[in-house]
Amino acid sequence: MMTSCAKQENILFYKKGEVIPQIYIEGEQYVELANLFRQLFKQHTGQDLPISRQQPKGSYLRFQLALASDKQMSLDDYRIYLEDESLVISGGNSLALQTACQHFFDKLAPRDVRIAAAATSEIGGLIDEISLTHDYLLENRSHYVFQFREPFFPTNNDPAFRLAQHTHHLYDIWGLWGHNLHKFIEPTEAMYAQVGGQVEATQYDFSSPELEKALVLAISEQIKEDPGKNHFMILPNDNEIACLCDACVAAGNTEGNASPAVFKLLNSLAKRFEHQVFFTAGYRSTRQAPKFSMKANTGVFVSTMDFPKTVPVQGSKRREEITEVFKAWKEALPRIYLWDYAINFDNYYDAFPSLLVAQQNLKFYQSQGVKGVFIQGNEDGYSAFEDLKAVVYAKLLEDPNQDLMQIIRSYLSSRYPGIGDDIADYYLAIEQRALATPFNQDIYAGIKQAQRKYLQVSEFHSFYKKLEQHMESEAPADSQLQKLYLAMTFQQLEIMRGNGILEFGYAAQLSGQRFYEAYPQVSVYLERVQRLAQELKLPIYNELNDRIVDYIASWQDILLNNPYRNLIALRKFHAISQLDEDYTKLQMLTDGAMGFLDYQNNWFLNSKTDFMLTIDIDAEIQSSKSISLTFLQDSKRRLEAPLRVDVMLDGSLLTQTLIPQNGKTGKARIPVFIKLPKAFTGKRLMLSIKQKPKKITALDEIIFL
């Protein structure tokens, strides 16, 4: 048994066959930690320790979570010390406690205990006795650049990965995260926002006493159930709506700005729960920093949604503007974290190389006072190179000043034997090109943006051929490599679809005709994607949960079963109306690149005015009997078919086609068929597309037959 540490120079914590400590846990949240220490203790001593839920007599081990609001300890800090008859391991969260367990044996034991010389084990010798000095203290103070580090990829869900890479996990720390108030409490009508005197159930009234009361109750229950989850995010729903009830207006809310009421509530909760930490996000309706002082246990995640993400901010035109954003937040809140994005959410299988850019930007954000970073990837499913990105972001969040080129090559070469060097060569090439290219690729982007940013098709084809040869000739690869193969095959199809009947497209012209036939390889790729998606149980390919089976069906229905035919293929229209800045290349209206239901690919968008296009009449147009147009309906994005299409011949109306308005919502392709007169002559045709007010027109191919 241990005696009082004040009376002895050395404390006998363990002696084989004589002194056997117990592990005492004061709550179920410590069970996994207790099992980890028990496992490590047995590896080093051969002794199995009992776990007790009642405070034992004699020597024992006790875990203790430090308070989240304790400024003396960050999330990564821990202390191991003697207190009365117990060895206490105290840490900022479960990851810190796990690290402390390992540190106890890896760093302390070989130096401070006597090891039996004759014993053998996998670790080189079993420990017979552990003696500690009465003033024993082992401390770790965080040396990481960022206190909170979460690369939000499926790879980071593995506790072993987090322990090895020193990353956090939102489900270990956060009692409430993201836009999830509706899951944390039971909303009632009294909690909903009011706009124009009407209840708006898609947003909350953050001045509502009922909402605050419900939150207080739910937070109290969460603390009781798991005190380790001591961070809470109070975040409005994902829209621009701000409550304009009398109380919110009195707090300072204005149209689209809910910050005053949200931060007032945050302060109230922080005052009530002094040992927990309360965050919101600088995002949409809470972009503006509060004008009043905030409690010490509050913070904000500044979203980079509106910032450049694939170009270095330091050298961008928006550097000063973004610097002012962080200045405002630093003046208002004590904790500034970052919410950044790492993938293309419209296409998880786009490589989206942004690690070298992220390295530059994390250095910039560090200089702006950022102390924690959440990197949003894909929550589930798979995104291209997600395993690599999880590792690299983990390294960057420890310290942005690392040799990423070496880390990337080392990881890929060792992780994928036989093909890793080729993968590394390709990935490093696109990373370097992405860093050097000033164009900003959006996190919701189609294949054309990728080609503009980093994707050189001939280079991709060369890489894909090597990958294909490896995958088709070798024994079945590990699942992670198969996932990458699926992603790259999907990307090959997107390249072909995006280039239509042009070079690198999916179809070739039959000799002497305006008829285009798909290459046989298209069917091979479609079958491969279908097979791999089924085998790997990866049914979706983007944030919207669009399904692979529907993607393949679109290929079949729109492209393969209806080969492209157009008498004006590759002819160029001229616009006489104002065009949107990102949609000026009118040849995409006759390039055979057909649109599916994803507006980012192959749809020509117009939001300015009525859409007016002209084309010179030649013999092929004069022989045409019809014009076929297709519009995209996507009500969530205000994309709707126009009211009508007028065909003008040299300024005079030739034909007018009204488009039925079905009143339906959701996504759909809306075909419009225009019958032309049997014979017409003239110099120029004009298509005048009458748009709906405040709506956007998305137009696919213009087909003359």
Image (tube, rainbow, N blue to C red):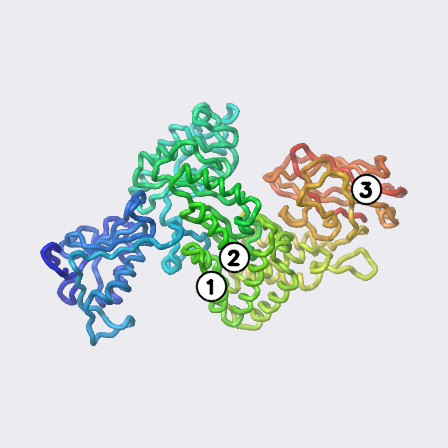
Q: Is residue 231 visible?
A: yes
The numbered dot on residue 356 is 2
Q: Which mark is residue 137?
A: none
Q: Nearer the viewer, residue 312 or 530?
A: 312
Check disc 1: other Cα within 10 Å, few if <14, some if 14-19, many if 20+: some
> Image height check: is 222 above or below 210?
below
Which percent across, then down, holds residue 350? 57, 56
Position of 251 relative to 133 (above/below): above
Query: Which amino acid, mark 2?
Result: Leu
Q: Is residue 58 left or right of residue 630?
A: left
Residue hosting label 1: 407
Q: Amino acid at mark 3?
A: Lys
175 with respect to 705 (left or right): left
Q: Which residue is mark 3?
A: 675
Query: Residue 95, image x and y in percent?
Result: 34, 54
**Element under label 3?**
strand
Mark 1 to mark 3: distance in Å? 61 Å
Mark 1: amino acid: Ile
Residue depicted at x 47% and y 62%: 403
Place of residue 667 in the rendered image (x, y in percent of width and height, measured from the top left): 62, 43
Mark 2–mark 1 Cα distance, whole angstroms, equals 11 Å
Give the mark nearest the N terminus, 2 or 1.
Answer: 2
